[in-house]
């Protein structure tokens, strides 16, 4: 059986878990931590990051690369739009989510959840303030514009873009935050719509059950 290396709470590991749930791919999870001594892990993850996907001797790191690989090996249901322009848009939105959105949402998660629980350190409140007051609103305004009146981000069909965008909101929730539905109603509804999908629902419930 394939192995997914990486702690489940990572937004990048969760992307792969959701993709596997959508495609009904079975795997074993090995909860590799993303910090501390990773010497033994470096041979299969040259950047030292999680996740890594393993099938026997074959290993591949990086959530985006892994899901693209799984799309080739398990084409249905498709997670990438068939139309080349829509596919390009979906891949860019995945990149936006993996960088700008994860930075905004995971900063709050790291300060409020990881630092106290794993490092016995107090959160840096200035970093939390900057994220919540500056980075997060900028992201939510952008996503509001992309969504328009649609249910999903690209071609109004669930895709890799929706997986990548909705995943770090689980970490935001673990940090005690949620989208202000009064200010960004379409973003709030989009996250809930993604989380309600079969397979994704159990993942969110498991990750937030404490
Ligand atoms: N582009 C990578 C990013 C993965 C990533 O940054 N993972 C974090 C954990 S959430 C990590 O392993 N960080 C450890 C490090 O940067 O040294 C992907 O999509 O898989």
Image (spheres, rainbow, N blue to C red):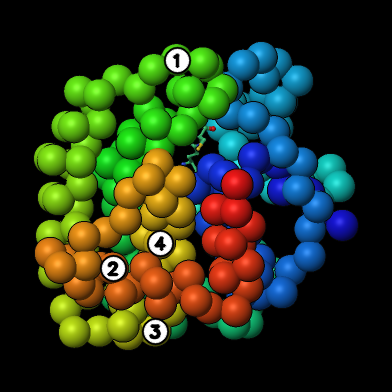
Ranked by sequence position, the earlier of labels 2 and 3 is 3
Q: Residues within 10 Å of mark 1 (few under 14, many from 20)?
A: few
* Pointer 3 local density, CA inside 10 Å: few below 14, some 14–19, many at least 20: some
Mark 4 vs mark 3, CA separation in Å: 14 Å
Is disc 2 surrounded by few (<14), some (14 to 19) or many (20+) residues within 10 Å?
Answer: some
Name the residue carrying label 1. Answer: 121
Q: Which residue is mark 4?
A: 166
Cα–Cα span, label 2 and label 3: 17 Å
Say whether marks 4 and 3 touch (CB < 8 Å): no
Q: In the shown orientation, is residue 110 left or right of residue 43?
A: left
- Asked if residue 157 is positioned above or below residue 120 in the image, the reply reads below
Q: Which secondary structure, mark 1?
A: loop
Instruction: Please tell me which residue is depicted at 13% across the width and 50% down the height of the picture.
Output: 138
Please give the residue where the numbered disc 2 appears in the rendered image.
Answer: 188
* Residue for point 76% across, 48% down: 29
Residue 129: numbered disc? none
Whether residue 106 is visible to the viewer of this picture, yes or no, is yes
Distance of label 2 from label 4 (alpha carbons): 10 Å
Residue position for label 3: 157
* Residue 19 visible in the current orientation: no
């Amino acid at each position: 059986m394939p192995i997914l290396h990486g702690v489940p709470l990572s937004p990048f590991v969760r992307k792969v878990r959701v993709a596997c749930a959508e495609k009904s791919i079975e795997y074993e999870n090995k909860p590799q931590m993303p910090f501390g001594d990773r010497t033994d892990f470096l041979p299969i993850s040259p950047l030292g990051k999680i996740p890594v996907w393993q099938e026997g001797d074959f290993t591949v790191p990086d959530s985006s690369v892994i899901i693209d690989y799984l799309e080739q090996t398990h084409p249905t249901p498709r997670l990438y739009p068939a139309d080349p322009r829509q596919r390009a848009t979906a891949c860019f939105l995945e990149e936006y989510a993996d960088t700008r959105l994860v930075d905004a949402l995971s900063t709050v998660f790291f300060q409020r959840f990881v630092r106290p629980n794993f490092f016995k350190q107090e959160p840096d409140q200035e970093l939390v303030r900057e994220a919540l007051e500056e980075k997060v609103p900028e992201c939510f305004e952008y996503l509001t514009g992309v969504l328009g009146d649609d249910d999903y981000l690209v071609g109004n069909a669930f895709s890799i873009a929706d997986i990548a965008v909705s995943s770090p909101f689980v970490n935001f929730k673990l940090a005690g935050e949620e989208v202000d539905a009064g200010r960004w109603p379409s973003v709030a509804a989009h996250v809930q719509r993604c989380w309600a999908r079969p397979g994704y629902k159990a993942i969110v419930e498991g990750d937030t059950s404490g």
